[in-house]
Amino acid sequence: MTADDSFGRLDDDDYPAYTMGRAAEMLNTTQGFLRAIGEARLITPLRSEGGHRRYSRYQLRIAARARELVDQGTPIEAACRIVILEDQLEEAKRINAEHHRTAQSANPAANGSES
């Protein structure tokens, strides 16, 4: 991989750019918390060639949401389940909106444009 290839990935939300230490620092949490949400299968960090955990920006956003819930007193397993359900709901809403747009473009008369 060239430097240009690496630089291009900086805008990729799924690129595993952050080490466990840096991720924990950014989230103001512990590495143990990151391990725990990994064990709960909320996020699965990629591994470097040396076997070290690497996190993407998307994974850090998910981890931050879980930490917010835990800080509010939610047990970690429940927090992870809530975050998973929230993520699934957002995906379902996105798919529903996409289907709605497709249906509207396929049948413009159904949009109320008929007199």
Image (tube, rainbow, N blue to C red):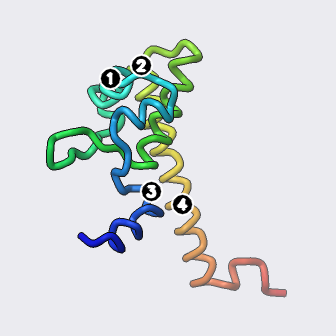
Return the disc, 3 or 2, that comes first in the chain's sequence. 3
For the residues labelled 3 and 1, the Cα–Cα distance comes to: 22 Å
For the residues labelled 1 and 4, the Cα–Cα distance comes to: 33 Å
Question: Of the residues shown, which amino acid type is indicated by label 3?
Answer: Asp
Q: Secondary structure at mark 3?
A: loop
Q: Nearer the viewer, residue 108 or 74?
A: 74
Please give the residue where the numbered disc 3 appears in the rendered image.
13
Residue at horizontal 49%, vertical 53%?
92
Residue at horizontal 69%, vertical 78%?
110
Q: Quadrant of residue 106?
A: bottom right
Relative placement, left or right, of 46 versus 50 is right
Residue 46 horizontal/vertical position (percent): 25, 46
Question: Of the residues shown, which amino acid type is indicated by label 4?
Answer: Asn
Quarter holding the C terminus? bottom right
Return the disc, 4 or 2, that comes first in the chain's sequence. 2
For the residues labelled 4 and 3, the Cα–Cα distance comes to: 23 Å
Please give the residue where the numbered disc 1 appears in the rendered image.
36
Return the disc, 1 or 4, that comes first in the chain's sequence. 1
Q: Closer to us: mark 1 or mark 4?
A: 1
Q: Secondary structure at mark 4?
A: helix
Seen in the picture, residue 101 relative to 10 is either above or below; the reply is below
Return the disc, 4 or 3, that comes first in the chain's sequence. 3
For the residues labelled 1 and 2, the Cα–Cα distance comes to: 8 Å
Q: Are marks 4 and 3 in contact (CB under 8 Å)?
A: no
Question: Of the residues shown, which amino acid type is indicated by label 2?
Answer: Ile
Badge 1 density bin: few <14, some 14–19, many ≥20, Cα 10 Å: some
